[in-house]
Image: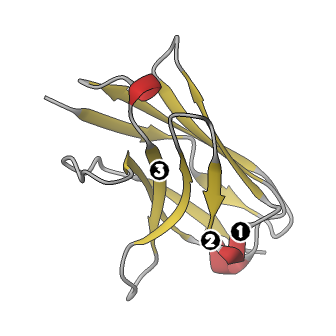
Amino acid sequence: QVQLVESGGGTVQPGGSLRLSCAVSGISVRWNPMAWYRQAPGNERELVASITLSGDTNYVDSVKERFTISTDNTKNTVSLQMNSLKPEDTAVYYCNHLAIYYRWGQGTQVTVSS
């Protein structure tokens, strides 16, 4: 059974940084394309960043040059480094497989506010 546990969220001022982490069990991040998603109040969940088996990364335009997705094969985790945060980044962030939506974790709240 696949389990996804996100952590690292919080409240930061605009321009601040956060690093999210997702502990994955049941599948290996080494052999699966993984992604971070987010859902803001009143909005649908959207794909924010993804990483393929070869390490290629993709980002939604609104976070390019600010967010970085990475995996740690030894710890079986997926991380999202978020810099230069903006109020519009406020959302609950989730990790999951890029193509197979396993049961969603509880997510981690990110709030960007002055």
User: In which image quadrant can residue 28 be found?
Assistant: top left
Could you say which disc has been placed on residue 35 in the image?
A: 3
Q: CA distance from mark 3 to mark 2?
A: 11 Å
Residue 78 position, x and y percent, is 52, 35
Sequence-first tag of 3 and 2:
3
Quadrant showing the N terminus: top left
User: In which image quadrant can residue 24 be found?
Assistant: top left
* Residue ID at (24%, 53%): 101
Q: Is residue 75 above or below residue 104?
A: above
Residue 75 position, x and y percent, is 50, 15
Figure label count: 3
Question: Which residue is outermost to the left?
Answer: 1
Asked whether 73 or 55 is in front, the reply is: 55
Between tags 1 and 2, which lies in front?
2
Could you say which disc has been placed on residue 60 in the image?
A: 2
Q: Secondary structure at mark 2?
A: loop
Q: Are marks 1 and 2 in contact (CB under 8 Å)?
A: yes
Crowding near the residue tagged with mark 1, few <14, some 14–19, many ≥20 C-alpha atoms within 10 Å:
some
Horizontal relation, residue 38 to residue 104: left or right = right
Q: CA distance from mark 1 to mark 2?
A: 6 Å
Q: Secondary structure at mark 3?
A: strand
Residue 111 position, x and y percent, is 61, 66
Residue type for callout 2: Val
Could you say which disc has been placed on residue 63 in the image?
A: 1
